[in-house]
Image (cartoon, helix red, strand yellow):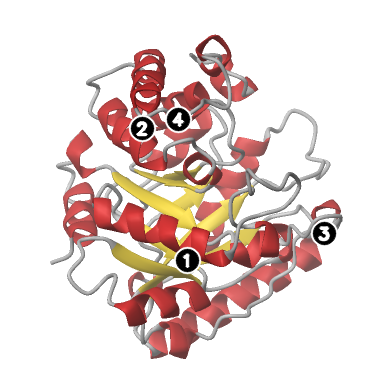
Amino acid sequence: MPILDKKLESIQAGSYTPADFIIADAKDGDIGFGRAAPVADPDKPGTHTPRETHLQAIREMTESGLVDIMLMSASTAERLSKEGLFTDSDVTPAIRLNDTTDIWSARGGRYKEEPSRHHRTARVDQARQIADIGLYSITFSNQRDIDAENAEAYTAFRAEAANHKMRHFLEVFNPAFDIRLADGADIGSFINDNIVRTLAGVMEVDYPKFLKLQYNGPRAMEELASFDPGHLIVGILGGSAGTARDTFELLSQAERYGARVALFGRKIHLAESPIDIVTLMRRVVAREVTPEEAVKVYHDEIGKKGIKPVRPLADDIQITEDVLRANA
């Protein structure tokens, strides 16, 4: 049984320990950011390195065994699978199975100013030849017709996935603009209610293996994680790169209030040393170090390797995300 499945089994059985916490490296940025997905080219300001840089980062993280899941675009997963990268690996390959309009991040694009619409480029039948699990994304915009259309697209996807024996996990973004919630309502409650409402109509065979959503604070996280802990497993997404302290603080707070999965993209991808950042993520979850201590250890490690930090320690140890600062 793959390590991912062993961990899911333990969480579902109610015997979770920090050793069961699932970490995914979200290296599917090419399906959102396009040519700007690989890291910036240090020798040519304003440009990005070739695709091979992106592929090599995936190879290195997979070979480290530090993550449980490697999330990729279909084309990336195909290329690396043909190389045999996952053949004898404990890392489970996963494929982004839809690319809703709110992840379209072309430079100069304005797609995030409008409600997210369903869209799929990857084919489930082809993806299933490479992986047996993938990500499906849906964003609730508080607009009846659009949200209903997106939910019906999710139903159609589940039917197709079932035909090809493709498992999935469900990503739910916060909308990127004001969705005019009723007075007194907060975004965490709105998201939680829509997740539970949507999944109420989903039978066991089609149920997502876990969720990937934005951290909206302790109350919202605890509310959703406590709803059906043996069945509905809650995970968090990383969002922007932020500081190293943001990375460790998000992980620590979310796990404390019920998250059992972390799927981080830019927080790993844009780190000075992705291997070191994930190593310390594991130590933070295991409560071997505090988030603040982890930043200091991280700077020590990259210093020993001669890697120049993006920020000095005094800045990198600061919490910059409001939801994290309020609950640190």
Q: Closer to the camera: disc 4 or disc 2?
A: 4
How far apart are the two marked residues, 4 and 2, measured between alpha carbons? 30 Å
**Label 2 belongs to which residue?**
255
Q: Closer to the camera: disc 2 or disc 3?
A: 3
How far apart are the two marked residues, 2 and 3, measured between alpha carbons? 32 Å
Q: Is residue 117 visible?
A: yes
Callout 1: SS: strand
Q: Position of residue 13 (x, y in %)?
A: 16, 50
Residue drawn at the location 27% of the way across and 42% of the way down: 21
The earlier-in-sequence mark between 2 and 3 is 3
Q: Nearer the viewer, residue 174 or 207?
A: 174
How far apart are the two marked residues, 4 and 1, measured between alpha carbons? 27 Å
The earlier-in-sequence mark between 4 and 2 is 2
Callout 4: SS: loop
The kind of residue on which mark 3 rests is: Tyr
**Label 1 belongs to which residue?**
72
Q: Is residue 298 left or right of residue 321?
A: left
The earlier-in-sequence mark between 1 and 2 is 1
Q: Is residue 35 left or right of residue 16?
A: right
- Bin the neighbour count of mark 1 within 10 Å (Cα to Cα): few under 14, some 14-19, many 20 and up: many
Q: Position of residue 140 (x, y in %)?
A: 68, 55
**Label 4 belongs to which residue?**
307
Q: Closer to the camera: disc 1 or disc 3?
A: 1
